[in-house]
Image (cartoon, rainbow, N blue to C red):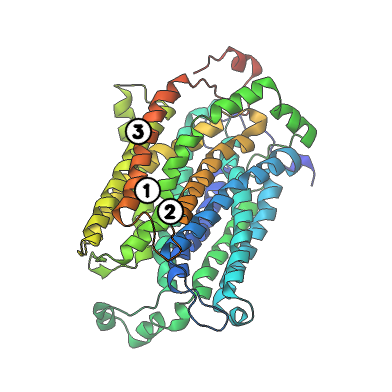
């Protein structure tokens, strides 16, 4: 396709770029597909996994958690591959389109787990194939989609970057909120409540209770449909958003391996080991928190919630807290101190430790034979979400603005690598604590308190190290003279 058909540099406008709605719409649908599938993985492996004869073949919680975090760590490491292909060889659009098709194939494979195919192939093998394809697709497009947001902005409308990255994160959580509420319901057997039976026709109740509506093929298949929609939305926006041309592999390597770039990359890696520990804790709301919720009283707001549905409160709180922090908290705190991105991240680390402390106290009650209400885990989600708002969108924006123009996708991988390494850490912990007799070394409260102390230590070290950071902001259309005159911050 001729280059003239695409916009290759940000338009000189002060308002919102025309391509942003397509990118954000794509992200909302893609995140629905990912988080919907992601929300039921641990519960599926521990409660519903069978062999090809149809007999139960479930995993122990620690083993399922270890494999879950291994999958997530692989997914968030593969953006390195997608970044190089996008920036150096094919461009972001072609990479996103090609890997989105692979992504859809992964969802299709998972949907086969509840079909007759599962009687011919071992369901564990189908699960592994599906997750591998999803890791390739979701991981490969990850740096391309997020940097595509930043590529739409130039010097004339750079003041909108923080707001748009927050809206981008907002779209992620819109998709996540709907999927983490709906998809677990499609997996687990359902019995209509007495109120519903009294107020809805028997045919509707019969449909809602149908075993065919609540099965692995439906629960894993619907996210695939949303991923297909995400792919179409992205394709529809191809004439609206900016396409930054690839630099060529040789130029790309030359751009990376020079003293100036290596210094920038070295600086950008400083926050990664600290943010990785944040993700080590945060990602467990899809694993250890779900396992904990299985033993709690989940009657809340007049409904008996599924253990894998509780995480829905996280994206809901995100939708509330993002505008709250952007328009109220940050401006108010900014009157007292200069609230730099690194200071926001540091505060988020300590806040996240508080969330895990609440979960540890819940576990203490469970270990004592009590059955606390799920509202206590909801309070932990409030604190966890505050930590996420401080850390995640801030690190996303920080990685983009500190990256040289020709290496935006690659440097965005410092964000995804932090997530990958955090999940590696959690996976290793869960593999190491398993004893041959099926018991675990970090039992109950001690497991959660281990992560509390790790997080607190990380926060202290971050406060010591980050004052030495020196960086500089890079935007797509920034003049070289202005860049050279810009002081390091």
The residue under the point 47% across, 41% down is 276
Under tag 3, what secondary structure?
A: helix
| Residue behind mark 3 | 347
Mark 3 or 2, nearer chain start: 2
For the residue pair 40 and 65, the one nearer the viewer reads as 65
- Rounded to the nearest angstrom, the CA distance separating label 3 from label 1 is 20 Å
* Mark carried by residue 319: 1
Q: Is residue 364 visible?
A: yes
In the rendered view, tell whether residue 395 sits above or below residue 336: below
* Residue 485 pos. (x, y %): 58, 12
* Residue 449 pos. (x, y %): 31, 47
* Mark carried by residue 286: none
User: Mark 2 and mark 1 in contact (Cβ < 8 Å)?
Assistant: yes
In the rendered view, tell whether residue 378 sits above or below residue 11: below
For the residue pair 221 and 296, the one nearer the viewer reads as 296
| Residue behind mark 2 | 174
The residue under the point 69% across, 42% down is 86
């Amino acid at each position: 396709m001729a280059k003239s058909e695409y916009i290759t540099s940000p338009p000189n406008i002060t308002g919102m770029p025309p391509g942003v709605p397509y990118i954000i719409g794509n992200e909302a649908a893609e995140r629905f597909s990912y988080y919907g599938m992601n929300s039921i993985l641990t519960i599926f492996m521990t409660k519903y996994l069978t062999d090809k004869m149809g007999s139960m073949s479930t995993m122990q919680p620690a083993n399922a958690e270890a494999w879950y975090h291994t999958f997530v760590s692989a997914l968030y490491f593969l953006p390195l591959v997608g970044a190089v292909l996008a920036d150096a060889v094919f461009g972001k659009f072609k990479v996103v389109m090609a890997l989105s098709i692979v992504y859809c194939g992964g969802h299709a494979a998972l949907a086969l787990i509840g079909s007759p195919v599962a009687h011919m192939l071992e369901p564990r093998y189908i699960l592994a194939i599906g997750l591998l394809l999803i890791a390739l697709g979701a991981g490969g497009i990850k740096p391309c989609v997020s940097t595509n947001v930043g590529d739409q902005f130039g010097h004339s409308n750079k003041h909108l970057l923080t707001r748009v990255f927050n809206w981008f994160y907002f779209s992620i959580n819109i998709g996540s909120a709907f999927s983490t509420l709906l998809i677990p319901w499609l997996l687990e057997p359902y019995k209509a409540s007495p109120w519903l039976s009294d107020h809805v026709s028997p045919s509707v109740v019969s449909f809602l209770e149908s075993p065919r509506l609540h099965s692995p093929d439906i629960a894993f298949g619907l996210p695939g449909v949303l991923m297909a929609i995400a792919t179409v939305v992205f394709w529809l926006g191809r004439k609206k958003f900016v396409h930054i041309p690839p630099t060529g592999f040789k130029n790309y390597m030359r751009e990376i391996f020079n003293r100036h770039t290596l210094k920038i990359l070295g600086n950008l890696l400083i926050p990664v080991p600290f943010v990785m520990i944040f993700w080590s804790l945060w990602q467990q709301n899809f694993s250890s928190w779900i396992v904990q919720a299985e033993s709690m009283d989940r009657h809340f707001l007049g409904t008996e919630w599924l253990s894998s549905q509780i995480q829905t409160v996280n994206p809901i709180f995100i939708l509330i807290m993002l505008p709250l922090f952007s328009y109220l908290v940050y401006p108010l705190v900014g009157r007292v101190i200069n609230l730099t991105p690194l200071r926001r991240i540091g505060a988020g680390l300590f806040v996240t430790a508080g969330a895990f402390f609440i979960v540890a106290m819940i576990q203490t009650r469970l270990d004592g034979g009590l059955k606390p209400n799920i509202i206590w885990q909801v309070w932990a989600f409030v604190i966890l979400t505050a930590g996420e708002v401080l850390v995640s969108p801030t690190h996303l924006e920080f990685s983009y603005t500190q990256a040289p123009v020709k290496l935006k996708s690659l440097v965005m991988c410092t964000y995804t690598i932090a997530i990958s390494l955090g999940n590696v850490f959690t996976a290793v912990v869960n593999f190491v604590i398993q004893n041959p007799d099926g018991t675990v070394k970090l039992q109950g409260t001690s497991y959660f308190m281990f992560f509390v102390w790790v997080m607190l230590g990380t926060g202290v070290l971050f406060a010591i190290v980050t004052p030495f950071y020196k960086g500089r902001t890079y935007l797509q259309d920034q003049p070289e003279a202005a860049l050279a005159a810009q002081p390091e911050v």
